[in-house]
Structure formats: C-alpha cells, structure tokens
C-alpha cells in the first residue's frame, strides 16, 4: 500500500524532556578518581569541526592513540545546572553497566573525562543527525510507501529490546533521541535520503532519564517526579506515578505515529486535549484524518502500544513480531 507521510507542520517543535532526578543522591558525574587537566584531555584527541549542540557542543574528532574517528561532547562546567548534572550522573551510571557500545542500535558514551572546567564525553561519530532533524529540515519529506518507515522500526525496537532485557527503562523515547548514521561502506547518491535508505542505521541515545528496574520489581517509583517529554510520555510517567517497561511502549507507539504522520496525535500544551487522549487514545486516534490513511497493520501496532490501561500494552518482544513489519503482510 502506498501512502505518503506529510511533512512536519511549522508548529511542530523540538521537545524538551523533564529530567529524572533519581541521580541527585550521587556525588560525582564520573566514577571516583582524580580529575584530569584540560591539557591532558586535549592531548587525547584531534578536535575537528563542530557538528551539533544540545546539552553541550559536539565536535568531530580523532582519538590520537587509536586513530579512530569519534565525536566529542564538551560541556562547560559553568553551564551545568542541577538538572543537567543529575541527567549526566544518571546516564553515566546506567550506561557503564552495559560495557562499550553493547548493541548496534544504541549510542552510549565510550569514555568520560572530567576536568575542573569541563566534562568531555567521547561517543561514536554519528554523522546523520537525529530523526527529528531529518523530519523537520526536509520540508518535501515523503515516504514513497509505508515500507520505508517500516524498515527503520525493527532497528529501534531491537535497541529497546536490549534495554528491557537488561531491565532498563529508557524513559524518553522520541525522534530527538534516535540518531542516524550509515552502515560501514554504505554510499549515497546525490539527492538520496539517508533516513529512507536501506543501509541507514538508527541508534537510540540519551539515557539521562533511564531507570533500572530491580529484579524483584515490575515498576519503579520516582517520588512523584514527572519523567519524559510532553506528547510522548505515558500517562503514568507524566503524572508522577510508578513507571515500568510498558511506559516505554506508550512512548514508542507515539513515536511510530509521528514517523508516519509527521505530527503528534494531540497538542501536549493543551491540558484538556492531553486528558482526553490519556483517557481514551483509541477514540482519539479514530478522530484524526491521518489515522485513516495508515495501513491496518500500522494502526494495529500503534493501538496495541498506546493503551490507557498499562497492563494491556504489548511488550517489545510482541512489537518485533508485528504483522506490519518487513517480511510480514501489511
């Protein structure tokens, strides 16, 4: 079935998340150890052009010892507010348990250096930007057919599966936290879209809101704090209730809807609209014109993740078996 997804509207903005402050009790961004000097850290890398910004400035670089290309995120200490510091602490703690680059569809810090003036995070070099960049900066974006966006979903799902298998709730799944890059040896012709190319790799990043679920538990309580991003956060996460793996599934369902339609299914700044969607997402979806343009299989997938009753949401393993994914019938 052929169906083009609309470009993002001018009113659709990059979203900001509410930090999970569960890491406030920790005293260090890094594991205990001496701080390096700026000069010592600078000698480790040949820093190149600036390629991005967000929680810090991001530069292309080469690690001197190995000669391997990488990306450096540099955060000046004077810019470290308590929320950002808590997020960095949390990400460092969560990802250090994985090992270096544990899964092809995750992008985690490789090394973290701390000096008196800055924090330097070495990461994989991912040159394609994030999924939101692609969707918002390409006004003429059209998926040729529904198989194009469907090809990227298994990669994102497998990244989430790895997290859940290791008892980690991501806590902030959204287009801004999906990075794009090429597979080794992949070449694009002029005018080709990386996001729509079969060889594009998608990597989940930003674990500042992530939480580990204890072995004996099914949910985690964060002291009434909201977690996630308006528009993507599940009802329980946004209402400050206990969250579980099913909270990620809600966000993942919203992400799938955004990928196909180019917009959120409701206006998150409108409290009435938010309450109505949280109460009955199935009814709300049916009232959206773009909902009817999607294939039955895609609608079924989204509807099975975005469910008011968290106990009724499918698991990530179920999502990987969805009938609409490549190799199955739409």
Image (cartoon, rainbow, N blue to C red):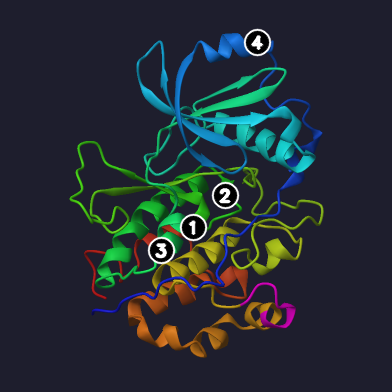
SS at circle 4: loop
- Where is mark 2, residue-wise? 170
Query: Considering depth in this image, is 94 or 44 the residue closer to the camera?
Result: 44
Q: For the residues carrying marks 4 and 3, which lies nearer the camera in this image?
A: 4
Question: Which quarter of the figure has residue 320?
Answer: bottom left
The image's mark for residue 175 is: 1
Q: How far is disc 4 from disc 3 in space, using C-alphas? A: 47 Å
Q: Is residue 205 magenta?
A: no
Q: Is residue 312 above or below residue 167?
A: below
Query: In the rendered view of the protein, which quadrant contains the C terminus?
Result: bottom left
* Residue numbers of the magenta segment: 267-273
Q: For the residues carrying marks 4 and 2, which lies nearer the camera in this image?
A: 4
Query: Considering depth in this image, is 256 or 176 the residue closer to the camera?
Result: 176
Tell me which numbered mark, 3 or 2, is placed earlier along the sequence.
2
- Where is mark 3, residue-wise? 319
Q: How far is disc 1 from disc 3 in space, using C-alphas? A: 18 Å
Question: Which quarter of the figure has residue 37?
Answer: top right
Q: How far is disc 1 from disc 4 in space, using C-alphas? A: 36 Å
Q: Is residue 93 above or below residue 316?
A: above
Tell me which numbered mark, 1 or 4, is placed earlier along the sequence.
4
Rendered residue at 51%/10% (across/down)? 43
Tell me which numbered mark, 4 or 2, is placed earlier along the sequence.
4
């Amino acid at each position: 079935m052929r169906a083009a997804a609309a470009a993002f509207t001018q009113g659709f903005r990059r979203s900001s998340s509410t930090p999970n402050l569960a890491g406030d009790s920790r005293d260090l961004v890094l594991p205990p150890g001496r701080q390096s000097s700026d000069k010592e850290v600078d000698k480790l890398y040949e820093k190149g052009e600036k390629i991005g910004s967000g929680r810090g400035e991001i530069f292309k670089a080469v690690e001197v010892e190995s000669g391997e290309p990488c990306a450096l995120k540099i955060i000046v200490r004077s810019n470290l507010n308590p929320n950002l510091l808590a997020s960095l602490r949390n990400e460092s703690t969560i990802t250090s348990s994985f090992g270096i680059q544990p899964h092809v569809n995750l992008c985690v810090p490789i090394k973290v250096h701390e000096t008196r003036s800055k924090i330097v995070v070495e990461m994989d070099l991912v040159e394609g930007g994030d999924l939101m960049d692609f969707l918002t900066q390409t006004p003429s974006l059209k998926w040729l057919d529904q198989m194009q966006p469907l090809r990227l979903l298994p990669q994102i799902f497998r990244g989430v599966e790895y997290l859940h298998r290791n008892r980690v709730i991501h806590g902030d799944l959204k287009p801004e936290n999906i990075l794009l890059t090429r597979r080794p040896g992949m070449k694009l012709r002029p005018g080709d879209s990386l996001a729509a190319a079969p060889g594009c790799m998608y990597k989940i990043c930003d674990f500042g809101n992530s939480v580990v679920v204890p072995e004996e538990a099914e949910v985690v309580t964060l002291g009434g704090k909201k977690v996630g991003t308006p528009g993507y956060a599940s009802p329980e996460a946004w209402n400050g209730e206990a969250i579980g793996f099913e909270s990620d599934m809600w966000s993942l369902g919203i992400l799938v809807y955004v990928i196909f339609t180019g917009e959120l299914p409701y206006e998150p700044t409108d409290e009435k609209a938010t309450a109505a969607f949280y109460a009955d997402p199935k009814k709300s979806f049916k009232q959206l014109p773009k909902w009817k343009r999607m294939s039955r299989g895609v609608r079924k997938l989204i509807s099975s993740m975005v469910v008011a009753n968290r106990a009724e949401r499918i698991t990530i393993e179920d999502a990987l078996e969805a009938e609409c994914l490549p190799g199955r019938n739409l």
